[in-house]
Image: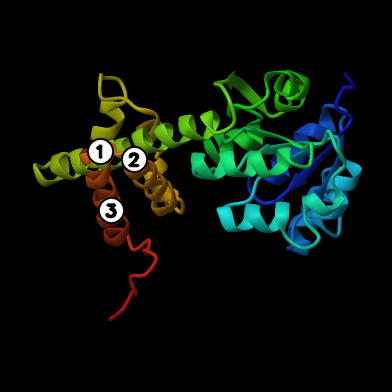
Amino acid sequence: MKSIETVGILGLGKMGCPLAGHLVAKGFKVIGYDPLAQAREKAMARGARGAASAREVAQASDLVIVVVGFDSEVEEVVFGKEGVLEGARPGLVVALGSTVAPRYSKRVAERLAQRDIVLLDIPLARGEAAAVAGKLLVYGAGDHAAFERCKPVFSAFASDIFHLGPAGAGQVAKMVNNLILWACIAVNDEGLRLGQALGVDPERLCQALRHGSAQNWAMDTQAERSGMPWAEKDMSIVLQEADAARLSLPLAGTVREAIKGLKIRHGLGMPGIPEHF
């Protein structure tokens, strides 16, 4: 089986641009597309070739990595006008690095399979800092042979790579990861507010807690200070998938409301809730 030589990247923002740089550094040919000219220019400064459309990226690539934010953007760059499907040839591999609902990932895989295109789940975890450092976590899924063929590409930007099963399984893992992450962020906030109310400096308390059994990744990285732009999307996926599975997750609903309160208190805003009434 032919090795991957040219990698396409769709979405050259906080995740996609560092990926492009790591891939170029490892000797891969990289072509990328983003609707924002500034994003394309940043990737080109790292050695990638800029493209005018997702179609052009697909035409030139052995593997296309999609790192856009939402289902609607995945739909546009893959199936829309000038999208991947218009430029893809049979045998192309599309790796979905975006976080989407597992059921949506399965539907994308089925639609692409009709054109002899392979979809791999590779939702990326650990955030922007890990992307810059080349230490992302890949929750992989999909055709195992295709995944192994693409693994050297993923190794250019990830330090931990797992294959969890058929298409959709990677998105399930990322969904569960996000549920637990947001739960940690919510309980960290409540615990530190309790400590502060009882007279303990929250920064000093947090420093001490990091050395005990309450230590967690969100506390270590101060994830609650990042603006939490994906909270609503992540928790919506969790609750929708639970409903589809006829599964009661009472804590997940509580976490969603706790994160909503945290964001409002910190002035981070919530979709559908105006800042001033």
Q: Which residue is mark 1?
A: 249
Residue in the picture at 73% in, 18% down: 145
Residue in the picture at 74% in, 41% down: 114
Q: Which image quadrant: the N terminus?
A: top right
Where residue 183 appears, as percent x and y from the top left, is 30, 38
The reply to whether dot 1 and dot 2 touch (C-beta < 8 Å) is: yes
Where residue 235 appears, as percent x and y from the top left, is 37, 47
Is 187 situated above or below 265?
above
- Give the amino acid at mark 1: Leu
- Give the amino acid at mark 2: Ala
Q: Which residue is mark 2?
A: 242
Where residue 209 appears, as percent x and y from the top left, is 26, 27
Is 140 situated above or below 77?
above
Looking at the image, is mark 3 or mark 2 earlier in the sequence?
Answer: 2
Q: Please indicate whether residue 135 sits to the left or right of residue 264 in the image.
A: right
Residue in the picture at 20% in, 43% down: 190
